[in-house]
Amino acid sequence: ASFSDPFPKPSYLFAVVAGDLGHTEGAFKTMSGRDVKLMLWSEHENVDQLDWAKKSLEDSMAWDEATYGREYDLDVYNIVAVSDFNMGAMENKGLNIFNTAAVLAKPSTATDQDYERVQSVVGHEYFHNWSGNRVTCRDWFQLTLKEGLTVFRQNHFGEDMTSEAVKRIEDVRVVRAAQFMQDAGPMAHPIRPESYVAMDNFYTVTVYNKGAEVIRMYRTILGKETFREAMDLYFERHDGQAVTCDDFRKAMADASGRDLTQFEGWYSQAGTPTVRASSQYFADTKTYKLTLSQSTPATPGQQVKVPFHIPVQVALLSAKGTLLSEKTLELTEESQVFDFCDLPEEPYAPSLFRGFSAPVRLEVDVTPEQLAFLAANDDDPFNRWDASQKLYTRELLRVAGIWNDGTPTLDPAVGNAFRATLSDKTLDTSLVAYSLAMPGYSTLAQEMNPIDADAILGALKFVRKTLAGQNEGALLELYRSLDAGDAPYSVDEKEVGRRRLRNTCLNLLSTLERPDTIDLCLGQFRSATCMTDSVAALSCLAPVPGPAREEALETFYERAVANGEPLVINKWLQVQASADVPDSVEAVRALTTHPGYEASNPNSVRSLLQVFAGANPAGFHRPDGAGYEFIADAVIELDRTNPQVAARLASSFDTWRKHTKGRSELMRVQLERIRDNATSK
């Protein structure tokens, strides 16, 4: 057999796969008229789950031609999916190697989220053909050159294939929950790091996701048309070369005629900037003055920071919700004042960093009433969702602050905003679902110093249960109205949104933990016709000990075993690993000896151990330290066979210094155990 590629490429892209594999195939005609054979391979029993990946590949190829003018260059494109793979996928030229979790999908085994992930990862690896393969990085310090850019292109693709607003919310949730936390911890590093101990440690949310946000800021500053011209220049200038982040920035500058020297700070400085906003309106001149200032906390090895070049998309809204003014500002100094002149009336509230125009924290003095107003009236879908999250965050932190002092109550403004969202029939159903959901534990933990895990968890349970109780009738009515009956499964945007909102209602109702709400969850589990609804119901039952929970878990597992579906068994592990039950540590430890768990399989390990450490804060942060000890044991054991996965799991302890003294000390003890017993160095 022979393989011919006339295009220069780095050696890390070469791969060979040998084995007894089944396949499905397709074809794609490029914009210049060439025929490309598409071949997707996996174990024979998986072939019936490859069709969605094939469609995602075809969509990716067509989208990259239409959006960036990038045509595939070979006559064949192979994707091979195997279960024992540490990463999600790898962009080897003409022969992408995938983890089965990022390729396989059919309605009975994959959730809506799985379908979206397959589409996203298939697109990511395909887009690497130009942003990573044809133009690659000079050295590993430039990794964000290909990964940050390709994540941006992947996100752009996802916005066009689904809902721009919904996809933007999903992407920002990752940045805020994971990347901001990394920026605030001992492993903080710039998107272009200056040193490393092991190359494996470079594959971080900072290099990838924050790197993508940096590319997005170029587009915001230059405008979409000029950004496209700059991308064309970058690809044409450097085709067949190994280049640097500076080369990319120069292409952006040369195509636009802009001085982007200060943008270097995003590549060289770690940390998340905080932007503080204040304003004043002068009625006599009809002028609104907006003062913005920026600061970035010290990070390991970088005590002093210089100002970043920060694009700030702003709109001013009247008390009736009408748009008074909108513009993109550029904050380049420590503090600047921006004037909005000749306004017809005084703005009621500013809408700042619309669309999350920069990866920063925002501090601004707004009242709960203004946040509720923005949550109901902002014409920017992201900021509308963000206003609801800020309102919830304020209330959750307030409740957490008094958690140990007495019986909390819920601010009526929060309840009113929740009800307004719940009853809004004009909003996209996915946006309603996301706006009804509370911020996660990790997002709230970043706002508390020191972190009081018990108070955060108590506040989350109290607020969710109170809102569910106050709106039980409306939630139940909406849940029932979203039942599609026997309609066939579809992954179109409308149907995904319907299921998302319906399952959000079910999740809220399940917090009441009454026999009737438990029966509601069990009823959905029994009648579910797709994996999305089945897992949603199972997740609602898992935290409630009792016969309904046991029936659902047993039935789910037996079906997965009977059908020979390891990825479904992994979902069974994930649900139990994340379930907030009193004996979660012991239950998850017991699962490590269950036949459904494979200690040698990275997907299985991540499904149980990584999910427990990252998605079960009640178990991981149990006051007696049992969760910490369990994960430390797992890291030490894993390190003997898979140090890369072990290192990722060990990062669960990154915030150890930020917790209350007792927990901080318990975490330190386990970190020292890992240090003294790990075999890899």
Image: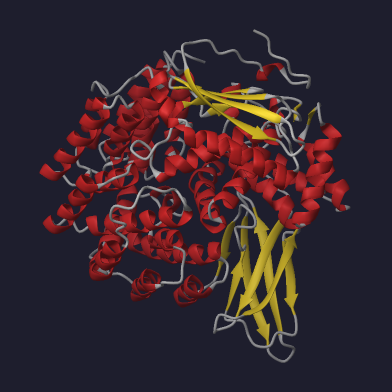
At x 40% / y 51%, what residue is drawn? 440
- Display coloring: secondary structure
Q: Total label count? A: 0
- x, y percentage for residue 273? 63, 52
Residue 558: horizontal and vertical position, in percent?
21, 30
Quadrant in the rendering for residue 511: bottom left
- Residue 363's place in the image compared with 205, above or below, is below
Residue at 80% x, 37% y is 235
Q: Is residue 336 left or right of residue 383?
A: right
Q: Residue furthest top?
A: 1
- Of residue 536 and residue 605, the one placed in the foreground of this image is 536
Any part of residue 229 in sight: yes
Residue 478 to residue 525: above or below? below
- Would residue 114 be found to the left or right of residue 526 on screen? right
Residue 436 picture location, percent across and down: 38, 62
Where residue 320 sits, quadrant-wise, is bottom right
250 or 411: nearer the eye?
Answer: 250
> Quick check: 319 left or right of 73?
left
Instruction: Say if residue 271 shows up in the picture.
Output: no
The image shows residue 618 at horizontal and vertical percentages of 29, 43
Asked where in the image residue 671 lies, by quadrant, the reply is top left
Q: Quadrant of the N terminus?
A: top right
Relative height, residue 527 to residue 37 (above, below): below
